[in-house]
C-alpha cells in the first residue's frame, strides 16, 4: 500500500508559496520579475535531473532491454527539458511595442496625406466563399488610412468574385496557374502592383480600421522588414467547442501570440505569420520575393530577411479578427501544414542551417514543438502501459514519497510557473489535452516529413461553409481509446492477482498513478475528437450601447402608385395620419417587406424615402420594373421613377422605445426589455448607431429581454454593419482563463448532461 509522509510535500508547498509571493508582490510585466520566477522552474528542473541521473537510474540487477528502455525514457525527458528551456527563455524575455506604436501613430497622423507611404492590401484567396470573403473585403475597404488600395488575389479564378470586386471598387488579380500556392499568388501580385508597403490578410481576417496607422510607423527603422500583429479569432476553435469551454478557456493559439511572440521579439526572432502583417516591398524584393521552397513561406521569409540584417517587429495588440478552424478536420489540416513546413526548415537552402544566422536564431527557429515536444508527449503516454504490461521500469522510484517529492512536484511547479508567466493563455489541463491531441494526430505527419519533407504540397485550410461539416477524428479517437484501454486493463490485471496475470511487484503504486492520469487525459482527448454542432450562423459580439426600437400598428390597405430606387409614392385607402419622419413598413405581395420613412404628404399621398430594401426585394422590384435599374440621370441627379399599381399593406410607426443592446451579429441581436410586450414573429424597425435603420423580426421574447433577427438589410447597410461588428474594435474574446479547479467539474457535467440546443435563443 502507498505510505504517506508529509515531508514529501515540502518541496511542492515551498514552490507554491514562492509563486504565491510572486503573484502578490512582483510586477508581472517586468523582465527581471519574470526572470526571477523563471529561475524557480530552473531550480526545480535541475533538482529533478540531479536525482534522475543518480538515484533515478539505480535500477538494480536488470537485463539489457530494461537498461535500454530506461535510457530511452531518460533521453526523451532530456529532450523535453531542452524544449522547455527554449520556451522558458521566450516567456521570460518580453518586449511590448505598444507605447512605440502610440508615438508612431501620433507622428504619422500629423503628416499631410501626400507625405504618407502607399500601401497595397492583399487578400489571397483560393476556394473561400462570399460568407468568408465579404467581411475581409469590406473591412479592408474601410481602413481609415488615406493611401491604400485593396487587391483580391483570386487563385480560384471565379467570375462571381471578380464581379463582386468590381461592384465594391476593389482590385482583382488572377493568374493562369496556381504554381507555388499562396507564395506564388503573392509574388504574382507583387509584380502587378507598386505600393511601398504590402499588408496581407488571409481571406478570413478582418482588419480593424486603424491597422495601418498602428503598424506603418515601425518602418521608420530601416532594419524593419515586417510588422506582425497577433491573430485573434471571433469564433471559438474546436478545442473550446468540443470541450464546452468556449466562454472560459482561451483559444489554442493564444499562448503563442500573447506570451511567446513578445518574447521572440525581444530576441529579434519574431516572424511573419502569413496574415495580419505589413511587409516592406523593397526588402521582399531584395531576397527575390516570397520564398517558395516551403509550405510555410512566412517563416522561411523571416529567416531569409534575418540573414540580410532585417528584423520582424511584433505589435501585441489586437488589430484584426479572424475565423478559427471550425472543425477538427480543418484544425488538423492547418496543423499538418504548419508541422510539415516547420520541419522543411531543416532541409531547405535558406532554413535554420543557412549561413548568416546567429546561434539564438537557429535555436529559436528550430522546430522544437514538432520534432521534440509532440513526439515526447506521445512517447511518455506509453510509458505506464509498457510498465504495466511488460514490467519494464522507466526509472527507479522506491516509494510514494519519492514520487511526490521528485516527479509530481517538478511537473506541478513547472506548470504553475507557466501559468504565472502566461496568465489567461496557459491553462494546464486544456493546454496539455490539446498538445496530446495533436501529438496523436500528427505523429504520422512528423515521421513522413522527416523522411520525405517535400512529398506533400500546400493544402488550404477549409473555411466557412466548407469547414462546418463536422464529424469525428477517427484516427486520434482510436489511438486515445487504445491507450486508455491499455492503461485501464493493465491496472486491473495487476491489481487482482486472482486473474492469473503475473503481477508487477515493483513500482505498481507509482505506475498506477501515472496510468490513471494518462487514462483520464485520454478521455479528454477522445472528447476533442467529436465535433459538436455550432447552431449560430454568425458569431455574437458584445455591443452594449443605446439603440432605438420602433413598433408598428395594424396593417392598413394602400396602393403603391409610383416607385424609384430611393422613394415610393403611397396612396392609403383611408385617411391616415403619419407625421414627417415616421417609419413605415410596406408589405408588398410577391415582393416582401420594405422599411421606409415619411418624407412628405401631398393631397392624400404619402411620399416615403426607402430606408432598408433587402437584395431579394430589390431584385424582384427591378425584375418587374426594369427601368429602376437604370443609372441616375446626369443633369438632375434624379432616379428613374416607375409607375406602379401594386396593393400594399401599410404599417405606421406606433411607438418607440430606448433599448440597450447586449450583443449583435450580422444576422441579429439581443436587446434588453423595450418597455412593452413583444411577441415572436412581430416585425420591428431597429435604429443602430453608425449603421442606420434595419428591419427586424422578434424570434424570442422573455420578461428580461428579447432577440431579433435582421431581415437581410440592403448592401450599403450590411456593409456598415460589417464595419461596426468586425472592423471597429469591438471587444470580442472567445474565452478567458478558467480556474483549473472548475474545469474537470464542468467537463464532467457537460459530458454527462449536455445543454440542449435552442436555435431560437440565438439571434444570429
Image (cartoon, rainbow, N blue to C red):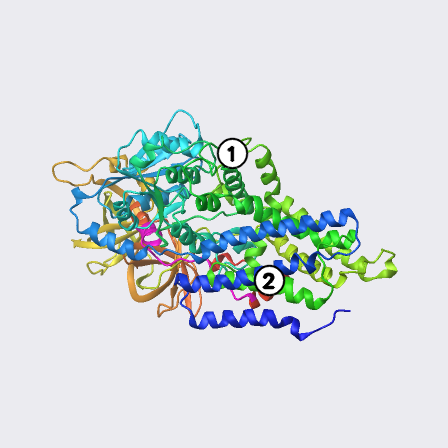
Say which residue label 2 marks. 47
Q: Is residue 726 above or below residue 30?
A: above
How many marks are shown on the rendered structure? 2
Q: Secondary structure at mark 2?
A: helix
Q: In the image as oriented, which residue stretches furthest toward the bottom?
A: 6
Q: Is residue 391 left or right of residue 706?
A: right
Magenta stretch bounds: 720-740
- Estimate the spatial distance between the alpha carbons at disc 2 and disc 1, rounded to whole Å: 37 Å
| Horizontal and vertical percent position of residue 316 | 37, 54
Observer-side mark, 2 or 1, equals 2
Q: Quadrant of residue 300?
A: top left
Instruction: Name which residue lies at 43% across and 28% down.
Output: 178
Whether residue 529 is visible: no
Quarter of the image for the N terminus: give it.
Answer: bottom right
Query: How crowded is the residue under tag 2: few (<14 C-alpha within 10 Å), some, or many (20+)?
Result: few
Instruction: Name which residue lies at 62% across and 40% down.
Output: 444
| Horizontal and vertical percent position of residue 373 | 57, 49
Whether residue 124 is visible: yes
Q: Which of 314/581 is in front?
A: 314
| Horizontal and vertical percent position of residue 26 | 42, 69
Q: Is residue 665 above or below residue 185?
A: below
Q: Secondary structure at mark 1?
A: loop
Q: Is residue 87 left or right of residue 447?
A: left
Query: How crowded is the residue under tag 1: few (<14 C-alpha within 10 Å), some, or many (20+)?
Result: some
Task: Please check the rendered image and state whether residue 739 is part of the magenta-colored stretch, yes or no.
Answer: yes
Residue 347 bears which disc, if any? 1
Q: In the image as oriented, which residue stretches furthest toward the left?
A: 635
Mark 2 or 1 closer to N-term? Answer: 2
Task: Please check the rendered image and state whether residue 491 is part of the magenta-colored stretch, yes or no.
Answer: no
Amino acid at each position: 500500500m502507498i505510505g504517506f509522509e508529509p515531508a514529501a510535500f515540502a518541496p511542492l508547498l515551498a514552490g507554491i508559496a514562492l509563486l504565491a509571493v510572486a503573484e502578490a508582490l512582483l510586477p508581472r510585466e517586468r523582465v527581471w520579475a519574470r526572470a526571477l520566477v523563471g529561475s524557480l522552474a530552473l531550480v526545480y528542473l535541475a533538482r529533478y535531473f540531479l536525482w534522475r541521473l543518480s538515484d533515478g537510474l539505480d535500477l538494480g540487477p536488470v537485463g539489457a532491454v530494461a537498461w535500454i528502455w530506461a535510457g530511452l525514457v531518460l533521453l526523451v525527458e532530456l529532450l523535453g527539458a531542452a524544449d522547455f528551456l527554449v520556451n522558458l527563455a521566450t516567456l521570460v524575455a518580453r518586449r511590448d511595442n505598444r507605447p512605440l506604436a502610440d508615438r508612431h501613430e501620433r507622428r504619422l497622423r500629423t503628416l499631410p496625406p501626400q507625405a504618407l507611404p502607399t500601401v497595397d492590401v492583399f487578400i489571397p484567396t483560393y476556394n473561400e466563399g462570399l460568407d468568408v470573403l465579404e467581411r475581409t473585403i469590406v473591412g479592408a475597404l474601410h481602413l481609415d488610412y488615406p493611401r491604400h488600395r485593396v487587391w483580391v488575389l483570386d487563385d480560384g479564378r471565379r467570375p462571381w468574385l471578380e464581379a463582386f470586386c468590381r461592384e465594391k471598387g476593389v482590385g482583382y488579380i488572377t493568374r493562369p496557374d496556381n504554381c507555388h500556392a499562396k507564395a506564388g499568388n503573392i509574388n504574382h501580385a507583387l509584380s502587378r502592383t507598386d505600393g511601398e508597403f504590402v499588408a496581407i490578410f488571409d481571406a478570413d481576417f478582418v482588419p480593424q480600421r486603424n491597422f495601418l496607422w498602428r503598424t506603418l510607423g515601425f518602418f521608420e527603422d530601416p532594419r524593419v522588414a515586417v510588422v506582425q500583429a497577433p491573430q485573434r479569432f471571433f469564433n471559438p476553435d474546436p478545442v473550446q467547442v468540443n470541450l464546452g469551454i468556449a466562454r472560459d478557456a482561451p483559444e489554442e493559439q493564444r499562448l503563442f501570440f500573447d506570451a511567446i511572440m513578445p518574447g521572440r521579439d525581444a530576441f529579434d526572432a519574431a516572424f511573419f505569420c502569413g496574415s495580419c502583417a505589413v511587409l516592406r516591398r523593397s526588402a521582399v524584393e531584395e531576397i527575390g520575393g516570397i520564398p517558395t521552397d516551403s509550405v510555410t513561406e512566412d517563416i522561411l521569409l523571416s529567416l531569409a530577411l534575418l540573414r540580410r540584417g532585417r528584423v520582424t517587429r511584433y505589435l501585441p495588440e489586437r488589430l484584426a479578427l479572424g475565423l478559427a478552424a471550425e472543425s477538427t478536420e480543418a484544425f488538423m489540416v492547418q496543423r499538418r501544414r504548419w508541422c510539415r513546413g516547420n520541419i522543411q526548415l531543416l532541409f531547405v537552402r535558406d532554413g535554420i542551417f543557412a549561413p548568416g544566422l546567429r546561434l539564438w536564431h537557429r535555436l529559436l527557429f528550430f522546430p522544437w514543438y514538432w520534432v521534440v515536444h509532440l513526439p515526447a508527449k506521445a512517447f511518455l503516454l506509453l510509458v505506464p502501459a509498457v510498465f504495466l504490461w511488460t514490467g519494464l521500469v522507466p526509472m527507479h522510484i522506491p516509494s510514494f514519497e519519492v514520487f511526490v517529492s521528485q516527479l509530481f512536484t517538478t511537473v506541478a511547479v513547472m506548470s504553475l510557473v507557466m501559468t504565472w508567466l502566461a496568465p489567461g493563455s496557459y491553462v494546464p489541463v486544456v493546454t496539455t489535452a490539446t498538445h496530446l491531441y495533436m501529438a496523436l494526430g500528427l505523429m504520422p505527419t512528423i515521421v513522413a516529413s522527416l523522411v520525405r519533407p517535400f512529398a506533400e504540397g500546400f493544402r488550404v485550410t477549409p473555411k466557412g461553409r466548407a469547414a462546418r461539416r463536422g464529424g469525428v477524428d477517427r484516427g486520434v479517437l482510436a489511438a486515445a481509446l487504445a491507450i486508455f484501454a491499455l492503461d485501464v486493463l493493465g491496472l486491473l490485471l495487476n491489481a487482482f492477482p486472482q486473474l492469473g496475470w503475473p503481477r508487477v511487484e515493483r513500482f505498481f503504486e507509482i505506475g498506477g498513478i501515472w496510468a490513471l492520469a494518462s487514462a483520464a487525459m485520454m478521455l479528454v482527448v477522445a472528447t476533442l475528437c467529436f465535433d459538436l454542432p455550432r447552431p449560430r450562423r454568425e458569431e455574437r459580439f458584445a455591443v452594449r450601447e443605446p439603440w432605438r426600437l420602433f413598433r408598428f400598428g395594424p396593417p392598413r390597405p394602400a396602393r403603391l402608385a409610383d416607385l424609384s430606387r430611393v422613394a415610393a409614392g403611397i396612396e392609403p385607402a383611408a385617411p391616415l395620419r403619419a407625421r414627417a419622419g415616421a417609419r413605415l413598413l410596406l408589405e408588398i405581395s410577391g415582393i416582401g417587406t420594405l422599411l421606409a420613412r415619411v418624407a412628405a404628404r401631398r393631397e392624400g399621398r404619402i411620399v416615403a424615402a426607402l430606408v432598408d430594401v433587402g437584395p431579394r426585394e430589390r431584385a424582384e422590384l427591378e425584375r418587374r420594373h426594369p427601368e429602376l435599374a437604370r443609372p441616375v440621370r446626369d443633369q438632375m441627379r434624379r432616379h428613374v421613377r416607375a409607375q406602379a399599381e401594386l396593393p400594399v399593406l401599410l404599417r405606421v410607426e406606433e411607438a418607440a422605445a430606448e433599448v440597450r443592446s447586449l450583443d449583435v451579429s450580422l444576422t441579429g441581436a439581443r436587446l434588453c426589455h423595450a418597455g412593452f410586450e413583444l411577441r415572436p414573429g412581430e416585425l420591428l424597425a431597429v435604429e443602430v448607431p453608425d449603421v442606420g435603420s434595419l428591419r427586424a423580426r422578434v424570434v424570442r421574447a422573455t420578461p428580461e429581454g428579447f432577440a431579433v433577427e435582421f431581415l437581410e438589410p440592403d448592401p450599403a447597410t450590411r456593409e456598415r454593419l460589417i464595419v461596426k461588428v468586425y472592423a471597429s474594435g469591438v471587444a470580442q474574446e472567445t474565452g478567458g482563463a478558467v480556474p483549473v479547479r472548475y474545469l474537470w467539474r464542468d467537463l464532467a457535467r457537460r459530458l454527462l448532461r449536455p445543454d440542449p440546443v435552442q436555435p431560437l435563443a440565438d439571434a444570429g
